[in-house]
Amino acid sequence: MNHPTNNIANHGEPENNPAISTELKHGKAYRVKSDMPFFTAFGLTSALYVLAIVAMIGAGIIKIEYQDFVNALSDQNIQYAIRLSLITCTITAILSVIVSVPIGYLMSRYQFPGSFLIDSVLDIPIILPPLVIGLSLLILFGLPIGGTESDPFTIDDAFRYLSNLILGRDLGIVFQIPAVILAQFLVACAFAVRTMRATYDQISRRHEDVALTLGCSHGQAFWRVVFPQSWRGVMTAFTLSWARALGEFGPILVFAGSVRMRTEVLPVSVFLELGIGNVKGALAVSLIMVAVAVLVLVVVRMFGGKTFESQRGAV
Amino acid sequence: MIIINDLSIRLGHFKLHQVNMTIEKSQYGVLMGKTGCGKTTVLEAICGLRRVASGSIHLGGRDVTNLKPAERGIGFVPQEGAIFTTMSVRKNIGFALSVRKWKRQAIYERVDEIAEAVGVTHLLDRKPHGLSGGERQRIALARALAFKPDILCLDEPLSALDYDTRNDMCSLLKKIVQETGVTTLHITHNRNEAIKLADQIFIFQDGAIHQTSRQSLIPKQQETALDDI
């Protein structure tokens, strides 16, 4: 009787064990099914979606004439909206990076009681309908924190009071430019937080550990070692939140209003132009936004594609 | 000298209970054990990177149990080297010195000295991208030793290296540790490394650390040597 492990030694070739036999059951070569149906189905589905996106943008481009762009760009209201969009989006993106770096880092590195809950809270701006965000902000800033029932002193009043005290000017939030920035920021920052968290997840904690043993405090380890390694993530977070802010409409409409030459950003322009029946104007503004969005996407891909390459190579 | 006294650590469901170990001054201690037994956790506790539930850690006669990692005077070389990717090799090696605000010239000279000792002088002006595993570990070793620590902790530093590079690194480690007189704790799975390098060998088994003789590892050397190739 042969012990299975001794088969080779005893006979020079393995015993014909049906469980491990390489002999074919029916003596026919095994043939794999064609890959054609798989790739056709997947390819067609993908192509349909890509085509829908291209067709959507293409329709606008076909419909519009050069003169419509000139008319739109020479309109003072649109010029103001472009300027305001560029300024508010940039401020929003800077604020988003400032806030998302610490949140992304803490959420990536530390587990604490309630961290799951905070993680869910951070996703609320992403899943909440935009109009609800605007409405919630409106209610928040209208909350009375003093005064009388007939003449309440609201949070918005508090900002007015403070700005009067510090700047000598009556600067409120609601239906003013700060409302545009706040509405953009609340949504855009959530995307920046996700980006920064993914960035810090990709950076090995060992880098900080080594820095700590080499003489750093946690702060020094972060600013000297971790933050420089995350700069591509920072750039991605900046461009993503900028792009997100550019397209923000719902919360701005409710919280900042749609007042021409005051709180009118590009999506509001599209809405207002459509409202007065100027479809070509609305289309021109839309295509300006599409161009800017594509530009931002290209920049994101340039940074995002290489975000973790250097870190991966270094581990 | 490294003394661990009744060290207990809790990490979620993972627990280490009353672990003891002593590595004499200027000795090369190798800690071996199965994956997941807690070797790295002990090393991290020594470095100050893990909170200790109870017990004490003494380094060079000092109770460091509650000190920050930066105050313990330990050079740490992790498994993957963890070279700082945004800095040149020179800045990596001089990192601890620049944190300690050494003068630029002094940093330059010390980096040159330690880089020559570990054989990476030709790499000093390079960025870490594209360096080989052996080069990375040499740089990580130089970085850990640059500020002349009393203690050196190595967490499986040779595990990702090929056979020849590992042998070279073993020789380098032995030479450097003898020259500097640094007390060393080296974690490894590899019996050959332990036999080549260790003055004291420890085995982590069944939740406790036992010291063993080099002789006890030698009969199995041939078997492991085949595994290592």
Image (cartoon, grey):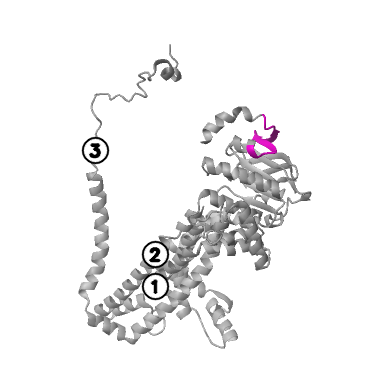
Q: Name the residue under label 1.
A: A246
Q: Which residue sits at x=23%, y=40%?
A: A34
Q: Where's residue B151, x and y in %? A: 70, 49
Marks 2 and 1 share the same chain: yes
Q: Which amino acid does label 2 sit on?
A: Met
Residue A250 visible to an observer of this rendering:
yes
> SS class of the residue under badge 1?
helix
Image depth: mark 3 or mark 1 in front: 3
Chain assignment, label 2: A
**Could you tell me if the residues under marks 3 and 1 are in contact, i.e. CB atoms within 8 Å?**
no
**Disc 2 to disc 1, how far (Cα)?**
20 Å
Q: What stretch is highlighted in magenta?
A: B196-215
Q: Residues within 10 Å of mark 1 (few under 14, many from 20)?
A: many
Q: Mark 3 points at which residue?
A: A33
Q: Where's residue A297, x and y in %? A: 36, 66
Which is nearer the eye, B193 or A138? B193
Total residue callouts: 3
**Could you tell me if the residues under marks 2 and 1 are in contact, i.e. CB atoms within 8 Å?**
no
> SS class of the residue under badge 3?
loop
Say whether residue A70 is magenta: no
Which is nearer the eye, A174 or A48? A48
On the rendered image, what quadrant is the N terminus of chain A found in? top left
Q: Which mark is residue A200?
A: none
Task: Identify the residue at the far right of this view.
Answer: B61
Instruction: Say left or right for A252 vs A110.
Output: left
Q: Name the residue under label 2.
A: A302
Image depth: mark 2 or mark 1 in front: 2
Q: Which residue sits at x=66%, y=57%?
A: B146
Q: Which amino acid does label 3 sit on?
A: Lys
Is residue B61 depicted above or below A87 in this figure? above
